[in-house]
Amino acid sequence: MCRTNSMTVLFLMAALLLSVLPLIAEVTNVPVEPPTDVDDFDPGLLLFVVVMLAACAFLVGAGLLAGIVAFALTGALTAFGIMSSSVVIGFIRRSPASGFRALVIQLGAVAGIPCGIGAMWLVSWLADSQSSTAFRLLVGGVCGLSSGVAVALLFNFAWGRTSGWFLNRIESRKSKVDVVNA
């Protein structure tokens, strides 16, 4: 049974129940008591409602605060892990450039995953795809990871070429200055 048929059946059952309830109420013939002029205001009920609303507001606020703290702690630990692993790679290879290269590649991978998931979600929405959420997350994450690493490697290549060009230019100017001063 598809979703439309089950909703139709549920609607018809609710309509039948709502149409039968007044008939059942008429059959019982229970006399209705006339309303009294007694004031039934009870401040205790108002106090109870105010206390319960305050408790709910406090619990919602505490939950939001705990979620924000957990999110910030996760981000801080991830950033610390990326930085420390890049420093360790730089120390092991005895080259700050290797540590910087590892940092750029890790940042590209970390930034690429959510970008890939978002892009997959957008393409799936625009194409009106019926793929599952797990498929979107998995394919988007893998594509984003590979794209992020590829962009980071491209940036690393461009950075290396640009810095090499600048260093060669500085060295050639330094040698020209030394020749002129001699």
Image (cartoon, grey):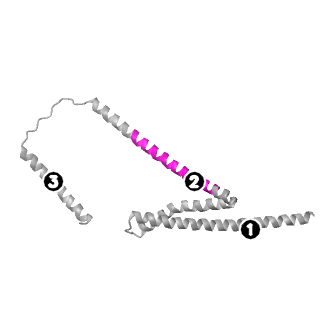
Question: Mark 3 highlights which residue?
Answer: 17
Q: Which residue is mark 2?
A: 81
Observer-side mark, 1 or 2, equals 2
In the picture of the structure, the residue carrying the numbered disc 1 is: 165
Please tell me whether residue 75 belongs to the stretch shown in magenta: yes
- Looking at the rendered structure, the secondary structure element under dot 3 is helix
Residue beneath the point at 42% across and 44% down: 63
| Front: mark 3 or 1 | 1
Label at residue 173: none
Q: CA distance from mark 1 to mark 2?
A: 32 Å
Q: Badge 3, how many Cα within 10 Å: few under 14, some, many 20+?
A: few
Helix or strand or loop: what does disc 1 sit on?
helix
Q: Nearer the viewer, residue 2 or 47?
A: 2
Image quadrant for the C terminus? bottom right
What is the three-letter code of the residue carrying label 3? Leu
Q: Position of residue 7 (x, y in %)?
A: 24, 61
User: Principal SS element in the magenta part?
Assistant: helix
In three-dimensional space, the C-alpha distance between marks 3 and 1, rounded to whole angstroms, equals: 82 Å
Check if mark 2's residue and mark 3's residue have beta carbons within 8 Å.
no
Mark 1 and mark 2 lie on one chain; the one further toward the N terminus is 2
CA distance separating discs 2 and 3? 60 Å
* Rendered position, 165 above or below 13: below
Image quadrant where one finds the N terminus: bottom left
Q: Position of residue 159 (x, y in %)?
A: 67, 65
Q: Secondary structure at mark 2?
A: helix
Left-right relation of 166 to 82: right
Kind of residue at badge 1: Trp
Which residues, given as a range, are shown in magenta? 58-87
Residue 143 is a magenta residue:
no
Q: In the image, what residue occupies the spot 28% across and 30% down?
A: 44
- The image position of residue 103, as x and y in percent, is 62, 59
Q: Nearer the viewer, residue 38 or 88?
A: 88
